[in-house]
Amino acid sequence: MPSLIRVRLWLPLASLLCFCAPLHAQLPFYTDDTGVTERGKWHFEFFNEYDSLQLQYPNVRQNTANFKLNYGLPHNLELDVDIPYLIIQRTAGNQPSSGMGDTNLGIKWTFHHESKGSRLPALGASFYTEFPTGDTSQHLGSGLADYWLNFIGQKSISEKTRITANLGILFAGNTSTGVIGLQNTRGQVYTGGLSMLHDFNSRLTLGGELYGGYAENDNLVKSQLQAMAGGQYALRNGLSLCFGLLGGRYVASPQIGGQIGFAVDFPDLWATHQSGAR
């Protein structure tokens, strides 16, 4: 799904980043944080991930370019739309595939904020529907409408370090983005992620995560477990660069891959340009 899962599980772990501007991007990690876009503002994220696949013959490599747009709603809600563009490379004699993957539409809610001195973490939840917009004949989509509920907890262990955990369930049971992720017939899939991030200064945040998925239905076949190390660097107010290196075991995870992308908080960029002009 967060690609998703990314929910990427595209596969579709991370947190709320504290740069000089309040970017809510989860990039490059798949574990979602509790942050939501401020009411009435737009937030855009893009990443490109290139993966070497395992046990996916004749598929050998996959490139995923993912576009995500967020809009802040009242009551700590956020509306998300997530669209991947996929290129699947295959062994000699097999035609590659390219095109749009399945589209995700979701809503995210932060219903409890962490407070100083309290042991209770920040809490949130998201619900996504994945629409089968990808071409199934080219392995660009699942051909199914999938529904995914994810719970999020985030706790600061110091002023600069925080831990984020996700626990989710796909009711329809398909987490694939292209040929990565749990692919299948119908059935429930359980997903989870755990990340730790540390702010080294006002611009640079680095961390790591573990993310995975499990299906009880044998027809879903593939389990997924992957790790990522990466971070985010604030180039300026409202604009941040992300980067990550990942790898995993089991057929539903990439053998090794790399990710690079950026996150933009549009109002902050506009305010910076207006201030400079004055």
Image (spheres, rainbow, N blue to C red):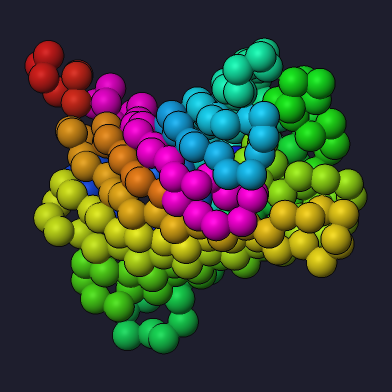
Relative to 67, does residue 127 appear above or below in the rendering?
below
> Closest to the observer: 237 or 97?
97
- Residue 166 in the magenta stretch? The answer is no
Q: If the image is split into quadrants, where does the N terminus sit?
A: top right
Q: Which residues are magenta?
A: 247-271
When the figure is inspected, residue 278 is found, relative to residue 228, above or below; the finding is above
Image location (x, y in percent) of residue 168: 67, 62
Taking the image as shown, residue 52 lies to the left or right of residue 223, namely left
- In the rendering, at what x and y percent does residue 203 appear? 16, 47
Q: Quadrant of residue 118?
A: bottom left
Total marks placed: 0
Q: Is residue 208 left or right of residue 198?
A: right
Residue pictured at 55% horizontal, 39% vertical: 53
Q: Residue drawn at (18%, 33%), measured in percent from left and top?
A: 236
Of residues 201 and 250, the one drawn nearer to the viewer in this rendering: 250
Residue occupying image coordinates x 61% and y 56%: 250
Rendering quarter of residue 207: bottom left
Question: Observer-nearest residue: 54 or 214?
Answer: 54
